[in-house]
Image (cartoon, rainbow, N blue to C red):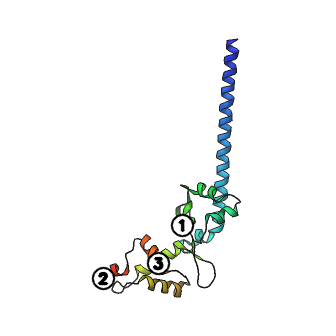
Amino acid sequence: ANKTGNAKDVREYIEGRMRSALWLIRSIEQRQRTLFKVATSLVKFQRDFLERGITALKPLTLKEVAEDISMHESTVSRVTTNKYVQTPQGLFELKYFFHRGVPSTQGGDSVSSLKVKDLIHKLLTVEDSGRPLSDQRIVEVLRRDHAIEIARRTVAKYRSQLKIPSSSRRKRY
């Protein structure tokens, strides 16, 4: 009688472990499907970036991708955390593809904040060190040459994030 009781306990234990294993496998498969949906959506939205590089990166929010794949924003946020993708432009964290837009003066599509930072960096690498561009002058150049509408404070913030000092500190005599 003791052996059958023991065999029953072993059987229940094994069945419990099997249920846990199957649950884990289903969870991993679900996560894989979710990650695939998010990645597919990112490719759809950011195709130009993948083909042409950073200047073609479009503004994109978690909300837009979430709506595109009919999932909650928090799910998209979780699934893109600490995940990387190899692209023709290099290796990027999935979160890299989410950036707010900066409005265009022509009323067209907004421009990604990363593209604006890239433009600011390029402007400042070729500036005359005897007469460095002020943040206000950068605003004017972006508006005139790139149809980008941006506040001086935003230029200052982006310049600071790029670890570029103010015009007075960049001046060379």
Q: Quadrant of the C terminus?
A: bottom left
> In this picture, is 63 found above or below 11?
below
Which sits earlier in the primary sequence, circle 2 or circle 1? 1
Q: CA distance from mark 3 to mark 1?
A: 30 Å
* x 70%, y 20%: residue: 8
Q: Is residue 86 visible?
A: no
Question: Callout 2: few (<14), some (14-19), or many (20+) C-alpha neighbours within 10 Å?
Answer: few
Helix, strand or loop for disc 1: loop
Give the residue number, with chain letter if any, for mark 1: 89
Give 58 or 56, whichever is nearer the viewer. 58
Q: Is residue 19 visible?
A: yes
Quarter occupied by residue 97 = bottom right
* x 51%, y 83%: residue: 142
Question: Callout 3: few (<14), some (14-19), or many (20+) C-alpha neighbours within 10 Å?
Answer: few
Which sits earlier in the primary sequence, circle 2 or circle 3? 3
Q: Which mark is residue 153?
A: 3
Determine whether label 2 and label 3 are within 8 Å by CB: no
Q: CA distance from mark 2 to mark 3?
A: 24 Å
Quarter occupied by residue 78 = bottom right
Select label 2 or label 3 by which is in front: 3
Helix, strand or loop for disc 2: loop
Question: Callout 1: few (<14), some (14-19), or many (20+) C-alpha neighbours within 10 Å?
Answer: few
* x 50%, y 80%: residue: 151
Give the residue number, with chain letter if any, for mark 2: 172
Select label 3 or label 1 by which is in front: 3
Q: Amino acid at mark 2?
A: Arg
> In this picture, is 45 found above or below 35?
below
Residue 30 horizontal side relative to residue 112, left or right:
right
x, y percentage for residue 112?
56, 73
Q: Amino acid at mark 1?
A: Gln
Which sits earlier in the primary sequence, circle 3 or circle 1? 1
